[in-house]
Image: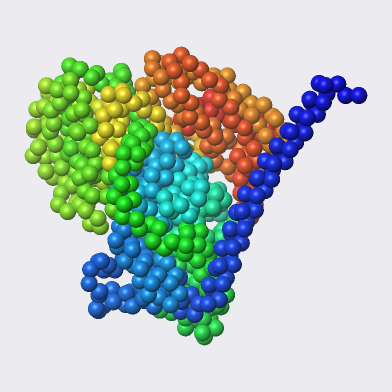
Amino acid sequence: MKTDLESLYIALFTLLILFSCNNNQEGEDSDKNIAEVSESIDNKVADLLDRMTLEEKIGQMNQYNGFWDVTGPTPEAGDAAKKYEHLKKGYVGSMLNVTGVDEVRAVQKIAVEETRLGIPLIIGFDVIHGYKTISPIPLAEAASWDLEAIKKSAEVAAKEAAAAGINWTFAPMVDISRDARWGRVMEGAGEDPFLGSKIGVARVKGFQGEDLSLPSTIAACAKHWAGYGFAESGRDYNTVDIGTSTLNNIVFPPFKACSEVGVKTFMNSFNELNGIPATGNAYLQRNILKDKWKFDGFVVSDWGSINEMIAHGYARDKKQAAELAAKAGSDMDMESYAYVDELANLVREGTVSESLIDDAVTRILKVKFELGLFDEPYRYCDKEREETIIGSEEIQETVLDMAKKSIVLLKNENNILPLKKQGLRIALIGALASDKTSPLGSWRLAADDSTAVSVMEGMLQYKENNLEYAKGADVALGETSFPFEVKINTTDKSEFKRAIGIAKNADVVVMVLGEHGFQSGEGRSRTSLDLPGVQQALLEAVYKVNKNIVLVLNNGRPLAITWADKHIPAIVEAWQLGTQSGNAIAQVLYGDYNPSGKLPMTFPRDVGQVPIYYNYKNTGRPVIPAPNQVFWSHYIDESNTPLYPFGHGLSYTSFSYSNLRTETLSQNEIKVSVDVKNVGPVEGKEVVQLYIGDLVASITRPVKELKGFEMVALDANESKTVTFVLTNKELGFYNNEGVFVTEPGAFKVFVGGSSDTVLESGFELK
Ligand code: BGC
């Protein structure tokens, strides 16, 4: 006989089982739903493909740039007329740089209502850091190390772009780069593959959301596949020549991570790799991406990169370029006209198999179905959404939050920052301080000039101080808009005098110096990393009359500011922070926001040290053998160390690290814990960073590699224990056969607030 209590237990237990079965049931159902949806998409794609002519299939592989004012008169001659004709015949699968609901609707209408099969276009655009409302440049966002904020920033960018008719962004750029001369470092997440992977994933998730078929989400694109960030001498589009280990362990990981979370597209790159242009590189696009990683989205070429294989000396003409690109797995041709002009003949004469075309078209159509374009081709063309979403308060708040989080406090001697809010006479100096365009940075094609909040506007909101402004010197002269080369002011110092005058009488001088917004970005490589033009001279001239200077940097890449570091008491790295730039900077200068950013890229002492990065190898001669000896790996005129290391960034409070301990949980599972305490006067956030060093391995390993980080928020005097668990994923590496291995042996572990101020311990893998 059961007691009442026993019966109650049994009843409860049964309920529990039933509940958990139900739950499983739901889980299985939703898995089934996803499987059913994708199966039904596969069927729809197959059915459509069956009904397509060869030319229509190839049309899907053809992408054109916006070609005429689509809401205006129809083009009658030339390139635009050809594109228009192609569009009407269904020979265009995608367009880029067509923006705004009216324009997108106009081209979509032709594709959907005038072509034989009515296949909708996928509309691409470079939504790199915002559409109209601009977020910090991607490198700046990376300095936040705040994955949630970065994801949110991509999410609102997608929302705004989608409201303007766009459904595909050519972002994120996940190229790792160690070369600050390369202008496109502004567009990525810096030098580290671990951080770069996390950020790439956050951005993909932000753009694509949970459900790609919503009209607020857009397809993302991991670019540029691959190796583009390693252009020799930092010169854009230059030859890339890197070894297998760098390719596998540094270049590939962020791409792989994006592929694993379902990024819908990849873009190939302009560079060659081992003598084969990436666009014609079957190893990259077929062997690694589509076969090994099972990527089921599509690959778009970079702009004209199919044709560029001719200049590379890899294809003899456009026809061969089309053949090589199609065979290598480039699914869509961006603006080379190679596929649309040549592929049909290549198939008919048997040079290119139609099954390759079918594969490419299947991939492209699938993404279009997933976006919901077949159900509702005008779903991104809602005038009301365009009017209410673009520039909305939610988006402004998000980009402001992102901007504050992106700021890195590089130096703050004698706590000159934060500034007092009352009774200060402040001299604000620098053309960039009143600039409302440059802070938008590069790659902000849809944003209007003069729409950023300037530093001056931000600071003027703190009304109880006295602020005087002097430009000091222009950064650039003449035409600076896209796509023009920026002409830097290297001669005009006529305004120095006034700047020096206001500095003399000030309690504190805030100088906003750095690069023009279009000095970085595509095609904008530099051989110098100094403050451009006469700005260094301006800084030194002002310093002569007032040493109490806060230097606010605006730049799209690491700069070599060694003189400033030696003389200027406070330096704030404010990058190009986008629409809300001035508000974010003012809040940090006045302490209404306590900075927590950390550098995602090493700052060199001198451009001659570049490429310089924290995860370097030891070499056979890492240290000086005896005093004054020369035969070791060094420079005779500069130290090996950076000016500011990767991961560096201060706060208005400070943090102490103690009690670093490791524990082996199981084979290849190591727990690492550390106590972090806020030992300063105010609350603050710290990015706790964990690095490991694999001491002896079958291929040489970097001296240290980032393998974990966590942001902790601590009140004054508060402490927390931060715990990381290292697994195979963090402990292993790719050997030169491309196999991921974890090898037994001794490891070092380092934890701290930057890559060089660290507590050290170790563990052994059995
Ligand atoms: C760039 C790509 C970009 C494309 C379309 C190319 O020049 O390399 O990153 O997405 O243009 O604008």
Q: Nearer the viewer, residue 725 or 698?
A: 725
Residue 348 seen in the figure: yes
Q: Regarding ligand 1, which quadrant of the image does it lie in? A: bottom left
Answer with the quarter of the image where residue 762 lies: top right
The x, y position of residue 353, in whole percent, is 56, 78
Q: Residue at x 67, y 43 (%)?
A: 742
Which image quarter is the N terminus in?
Answer: top right
Q: Specify the farthest residue to the right.
A: 1
Q: Where 37 falls versus 430 (above or below)?
A: below
Q: Nearer the viewer, residue 757 or 724?
A: 724
The x, y position of residue 422, in whole percent, is 20, 17
The x, y position of residue 298, in whole percent, is 50, 62
Q: Nearer the viewer, residue 478 or 641?
A: 478
Which image quarter is the C terminus in?
Answer: top right
Q: Where 137 falls versus 625 (above or below)?
A: below
Q: Residue at x 36, y 25 (%)?
A: 594
Q: Nearer the viewer, residue 477 or 172?
A: 172
What colouring method underlies this structural image? Answer: rainbow
Answer with the quarter of the image where residue 95 lies: bottom left
Q: Where 449 falls versus 117 (above or below)?
A: above
Query: In the image, 7: left or right of 43?
Result: right
Total tally of numbered discs in the picture:
0
Query: In the image, 423: left or right of 178?
Result: left
Q: Residue at x 33, y 74 (%)?
A: 83
The x, y position of residue 707, in whole percent, is 55, 37
Q: Residue at x 44, y 61 (%)?
A: 376
Query: In the image, 590: left or right of 229?
Result: left
Residue 356 seen in the figure: no
